[in-house]
Amino acid sequence: MLSDNFAVTKETSVEVLPPARAAAQIHAGHALADATRGAAESAGASLNAVSRPLSLADEAHRQLLLQLDMALWKPGAKLPPEKALADSLGVSRPVLREALARLKADGRIESRQGAGAFVAERNKIAAFRLHTAPRSGATTHRDAHPVPAAEDADTAERELLELRQIVEAGAAELAAQRRTDADLMAIRNALGDMSAALSVRADGADADDRFHNAIAAATHNPQITRFVEFLGAQFSASRKVTWDHTGYAVGIAEVGHADHIAILEAIESSDAAAARVRAHAHVQRALDRVLARFATRAATSPSGV
């Protein structure tokens, strides 16, 4: 159960809210619910009225999603107590708990034992999570030898890159078939920002992310777009090595940029096969570097593993 009159500050410390401030937050929730209810009623339907096929939990879930989308609570903030939320939505606490469970599965909120429910720090993240390789010291199913930390990290990177390769190659193929002029403009803008970063040896990772997100958007498949956005932080981490000091020193940034230009050219010319092959090869370069580390480690390991 959520305890009354608590909230999380920007530093994530918990503070007791004065009664007036707690009441103000609850009032704000009521006000938003009233506003959305009024808008729906003007269209001939009450927001809180349950019309099939929606259940009470469906409706509570929908209203809470709306409040999150409208940023009534900021990332990291604690949600109001269960009773206050249930009253504001006009539902029972069991119904509210079902709605909150769905929000947790959506990745929109997170529970902290003994503290309550909080808005996820990265609101709108996916319920899907990437699992890293076993922690250092864990044994593999193949033998009883501990897995070295370096191999642990390389295994996690390899798995992530394999996922990136499948997603980005497929997205590039569809983008070449479906892109619009507006899509091409978004991709070119991101490529231009990468060019600017490259010219001064700056960090172009954000532009790199936008380039690949723009390609995903150009598929005009919202599931692909959402999936790439959901995994954005993980995918972004695997791209940062391109733009760091070492990436510039060994030429990875320049090669990666040339790959981006080639991918864009294939999408511009609506050559789906070429777009897939070039996007696949782009990620394969990074995979080859990881596989080379595995090979080097195996060659120098006394046990040959």
Image (cartoon, rainbow, N blue to C red):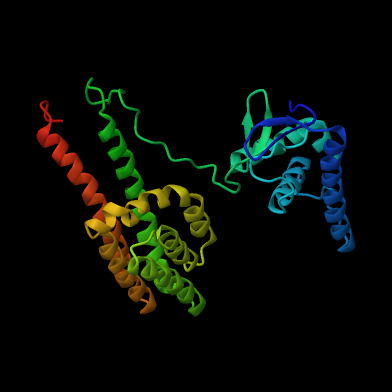
Residue lying at 54% horizontally and 60% vertically, measured from the top left: 222
In the displayed structure, 199 sits above or below 130; it is below
Q: Is residue 179 visible?
A: no
| Residue 286 rendering spot, x and y as whole percentages | 27, 53
Decide which of 96, 156 is in the foreground and name it: 156
Q: Quadrant of residue 293?
A: top left
| Residue 1 rendering spot, x and y as whole percentages | 74, 25
Q: Is residue 231 left or right of residue 34?
A: left
In the displayed structure, 106 sits above or below 232; it is above
Decide which of 116, 8 is in the foreground and name it: 8
In the displayed structure, 71 sits above or below 272; it is above
* Quadrant of the rendering where the C terminus is positioned: top left
Q: Is residue 123 left or right of residue 20?
A: left
| Residue 280 rendering spot, x and y as whole percentages | 29, 60
Q: Residue furthest front?
A: 200
Q: Is residue 143 visible?
A: yes
Decide which of 174, 69 is in the foreground and name it: 69
